[in-house]
Image: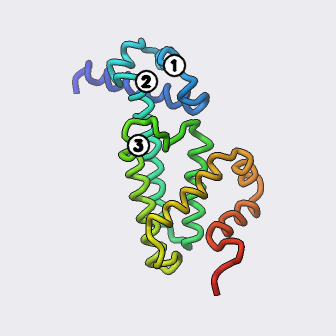
Amino acid sequence: MDGFARRKEQSKEDIRRAAEELFSRFGADKVSVNDIARKAGVSQATIYNNFGSKEELVHDYRKSIVSGMAGRFREILVWKKSFIEKFEGLLQSWIDVADRYKIEIENPDVKSPDAINLEIESALREFIKQGKEQGNLRTDLSEEAITAYIKFFHQGIANNQEIRDKMKRDGKYSQDLFSLFMYGIKGQAA
């Protein structure tokens, strides 16, 4: 890689870092291209030359978040722990992303949201398959239904800062929610 290509790549990484910091602090909607350019120490033209538009930069940002989440989910799959502990780790990772990044990953305005979420869907399906194989999830339920159920739970927590804060402060509360998720209010089937 020649000097020009190296500088161009460094500039692109500086833009990504600046955008991540600003998006996670203020939300993508409240950050302008000018804000990102100032933070990255580049011109607005450099941002447009590298990413085309703010929308493309936001898309790139979301894609990196989703890739990181999917990688984390796959790491959790190989833990030498119980399925419940793995499930708690998976949901906690998802919740941590909601806390860290002020951006909706499943935003319909994003260019090709299905392509972005494909990686997470794949990791989630691996998790469900493992749960069924180990007898921790009902085999009579479809993967789609289980995935939807997990997403309902996640979105309920991700969209409620008060619940997330209480989960961080109160381990029993957090355990109770996971238990309710897994076994319902009736309890484990006999």
Question: Among all residues in the image, which is located at the extreme left?
Answer: 2
Callout 3 crowding tier (Cα within 10 Å): few <14, some 14–19, many ≥20: some
Residue with the mark numbered 3: 113
In this figure, which residue is indicated by the disc labeled 2?
54
Question: Do callouts 1 and 2 mark residues in contact (Cβ within 8 Å)?
Answer: yes
Q: Is residue 119 left or right of residue 35?
A: left
Marks 1 and 2 sit apart, C-alpha to C-alpha, by 8 Å
N-terminal label among 3 and 1? 1
Give how far apart the Cα atoms at labels 2 and 3 are.
Answer: 16 Å
Q: Single out the mark in the foreground, 3 or 1.
A: 3
Q: Which residue is mark 1?
A: 32
Q: Relative to 188, does residue 170 appear above or below in the rendering? A: above
Q: Are marks 2 and 3 in contact (CB under 8 Å)?
A: no
Whole-percent x, y for residue 176 in the image: 72, 66
Give x and y (percent) for residue 13.
40, 28
In the displayed structure, 27 sits above or below 101; it is above
Q: Quadrant of the C terminus?
A: bottom right
Given the image, on which type of amino acid does mark 3 rest? Answer: Pro
Q: Residues within 10 Å of mark 2 (few under 14, many from 20)?
A: some
Asked where in the image residue 87 lies, by quadrant, the reply is bottom right
